[in-house]
Image (cartoon, rainbow, N blue to C red):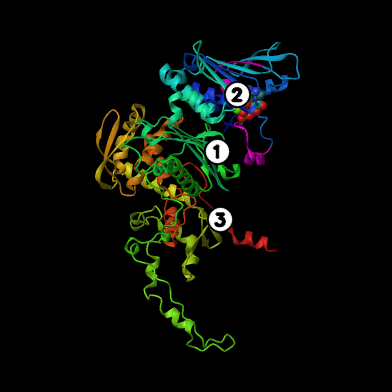
């Protein structure tokens, strides 16, 4: 038979890549603004027409490009920002994939004008659907101007998929806000259909927030500052009395990049515990600075998701920093942190007069005398209460995994696993697993050892559980004592309605879905009540982030999203039985090798590999 495999022509490959990078005009806005920032500009203008469908133009005063670079910038994988894979771990630029301009040029009419400081004249290039229409010498100021016209002109299906101008404009403005908030040291302007919507001069962070959200915002802001070895936090949270029914002004930036994290959002909510009116959301503008080597930002091409090495610690630090600020600004009723409760005088003793301790001196004590078997010290020890182990009550580890999660283990396909573990069963070791850095589970196998990523492995387990629940419609539900009412925007509720039926199959029971809230009566057994809102928020943001054209399956997305929210986190310490549970359940999965998002769940290290290291 003849050979049938062919390499895709570049313009087709670019169009496919464009599907990932460019979902709507706002994606173009993001990429162009980020390029302008990477170019070192301190003044950036964004001009849009018809919500960006007709025109997105970004003009910057950055370093510009040479003639050759201008031409090369539209090639796929052309980037000036990394040279080798190692650079990926020390990123301080926004872009690095080198595919934004190539992708945009594949699906729009693009005009570039650019000039470097040292040159007298600049370069102008016009590209239409990946084909260069013209390249000329032009007179243009130092910096770069890129116009992107008629987005998706050659992919009608994508163009038709775009929402109304109002919705698309909202996305564009959201993107503009995010970038502008992350860079108060750069001036930004936004012109929409010929009129100026924003003009933000270079300023400090507080002024930038106020310039965007209005002067009234100023009095609402409470500063948050914290500087620890692993994390630096700076920014503001909104005072609780200004919290809103919809989750509008909530911004996390990690190393100056906007991110979404339902988990960290939850840390903030829990710091506000007891201060918020029911169903309202606090605003926040928080910048987190972490060592770039401890994060992975490249999970999603549009890069609003991030993976931290130790989410658990970040959660705790963030929560306590916000709590601290709310307390300092006399917003929280009590300052209940940083104080050792054991130092407090118990109430029952408060009115007792203190007695001077009597000092007894053993005058017969001779330090040079051999100690007698029943000396004073031994008797002293005997006086300690014999129920000393009660001291440890309450110190058991508080993993978020409920007992339920473990008691209902089913080992359907144990056979497939047994060969891996044969030898382990023979040896009578007390525990066959070991947890490393609260991140990996190490387990001995015939040929060496298994190193399992606890978070990814648990995601896989839960994902398959949820998929099964949804398809077989057997999710077991636990009744809530009081129905929980959660408020959402109309757009967010729309998303929940899309997946409502599937949610019900996992065990959710909704009693009332209105235009602005839902009431929840029951949840899947594995979902703790305190996590309900975080799971739904994560779900909404996952649906919003989903690439529209990819074969979107609500069921799969839901299972992935819930698995992600509920999976034990990196940084969480696990008991031996919890570790073993994960190992056993993982290998009972249909696809144990990868997480639901296709990341490796475990690696094996052979004894032979170890042997080599000891030569
Ligand atoms: P990336 O940003 O990932 O490197 P892009 O496709 O967005 O990839 O851009 C490709 C290259 O074009 C960049 O690495 C940069 O060298 C150059 N470039 C793009 N936009 C600008 C700009 N506004 N000013 C100067 N150089 C730019
Ligand atoms: Mg870029």
Give the answer, above or below, for where 377 lies relative to 170: below
Classify mark 2: residues with Cα within 10 Å, few (<14), some (14-19) or many (20+).
many
Residue at 31% across / 43% down in the picture? 506
Q: Which residues are magenta?
A: 84-113
* Ligand 1 quarter of the rendering: top right
Classify mark 3: residues with Cα within 10 Å, few (<14), some (14-19) or many (20+).
some
| Residue to which mark 1 is pinned | 297
Report whether 524 appears left or right of 128.
Answer: left
Is mark 1 in CB contact (under 8 Å) with mark 2? no
The front one of 62 and 82 is 62
The front one of 186 and 48 is 186
Tell me if residue 76 can be seen. no
- Single out the mark in the foreground, 3 or 1: 1
Residue at 52% across / 31% down in the picture? 302
Name the secondary structure under disc 2.
helix
Question: Disc 2, ligand 1: is the CB inside 8 Å?
Answer: yes
């Amino acid at each position: 038979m003849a050979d049938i495999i062919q390499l895709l022509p570049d313009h087709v490959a670019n169009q496919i890549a464009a599907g990932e990078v460019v979902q709507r005009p706002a994606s173009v806005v993001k990429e162009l603004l980020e390029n302008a920032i990477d170019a070192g500009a301190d003044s950036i203008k964004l001009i849009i027409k018809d919500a960006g469908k007709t025109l997105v133009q970004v003009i910057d005063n950055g370093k510009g490009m040479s003639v050759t670079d201008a031409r090369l910038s539209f090639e796929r994988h052309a980037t000036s920002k990394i040279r080798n894979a190692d650079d990926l771990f020390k990123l301080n630029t926004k872009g690095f994939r080198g595919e934004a301009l190539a992708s945009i040029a594949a699906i729009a009419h693009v005009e570039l004008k650019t000039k470097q400081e040292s040159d007298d004249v600049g370069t102008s290039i016009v590209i239409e659907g990946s084909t260069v229409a013209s390249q000329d010498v032009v007179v243009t100021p130092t910096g770069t101007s890129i116009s992107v016209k008629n987005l998706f002109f050659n992919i009608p299906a994508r163009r038709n998929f775009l929402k109304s101008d109002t919705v698309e404009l909202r996305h564009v403005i959201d993107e503009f806000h995010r970038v502008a908030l992350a860079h108060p040291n750069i001036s930004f302007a936004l012109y929409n259909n010929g009129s100026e919507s924003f003009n933000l001069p270079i300023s400090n962070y507080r002024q930038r927030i106020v310039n965007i959200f209005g002067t009234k915002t100023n009095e609402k802001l409470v500063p948050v500052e914290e500087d620890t070895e692993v994390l630096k936090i700076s920014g503001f949270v909104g005072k609780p009395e200004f919290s809103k029914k919809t989750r509008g002004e909530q911004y996390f930036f990690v190393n100056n990049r906007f991110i979404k994290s339902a988990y960290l959002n939850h840390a903030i909510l829990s710091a506000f515990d007891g201060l918020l009116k029911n169903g309202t959301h606090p605003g926040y503008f928080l910048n987190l600075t972490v060592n770039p080597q401890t994060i992975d930002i490249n999970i999603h091409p549009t890069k609003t998701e991030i993976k931290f090495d130790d989410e658990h610690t970040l959660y705790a630090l963030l929560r306590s920093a916000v709590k601290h600020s709310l307390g300092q600004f006399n917003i929280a009723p009590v300052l209940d942190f940083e104080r050792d409760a054991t130092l407090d005088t118990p109430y029952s003793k408060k009115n007792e007069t203190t007695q001077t301790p009597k000092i007894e001196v053993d005058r017969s004590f001779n330090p040079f005398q051999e100690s007698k078997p029943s000396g004073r010290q031994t008797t002293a020890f005997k006086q300690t209460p014999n129920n000393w182990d009660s001291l440890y009550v309450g110190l058991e580890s508080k993993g978020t995994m409920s007992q339920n999660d473990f008691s209902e283990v089913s080992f359907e396909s144990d056979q497939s696993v047994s060969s891996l573990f044969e030898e382990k069963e023979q040896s009578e070791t007390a525990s066959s697993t070991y947890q490393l850095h609260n991140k990996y589970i190490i387990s001995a196998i015939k040929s060496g050892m298994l190193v399992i990523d606890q978070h990814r492995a648990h995601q896989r387990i839960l994902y398959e559980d949820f998929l099964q629940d949804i398809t077989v419609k057997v999710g077991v539900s636990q009744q809530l004592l009081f129905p929980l009412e959660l408020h959402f925007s109309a757009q967010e509720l729309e998303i929940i309605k899309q997946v409502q039926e599937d949610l019900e199959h996992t065990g959710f029971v909704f009693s009332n879905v209105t235009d602005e809230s839902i009431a929840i009566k029951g949840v899947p057994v594995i979902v703790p009540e305190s996590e309900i809102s975080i799971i739904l928020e994560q779900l909404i943001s996952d649906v919003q982030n989903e690439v529209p054209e990819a074969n979107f399956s609500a069921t799969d997305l839901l299972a992935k999203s819930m698995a992600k929210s509920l999976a034990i986190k990196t940084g969480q310490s696990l008991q031996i039985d919890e570790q073993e549970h994960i190992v056993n359940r993982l290998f009972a999965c249909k696809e144990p090798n990868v997480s639901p998002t296709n990341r490796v769940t475990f690696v094996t290290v052979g004894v032979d590999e170890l042997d080599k290291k000891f030569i």
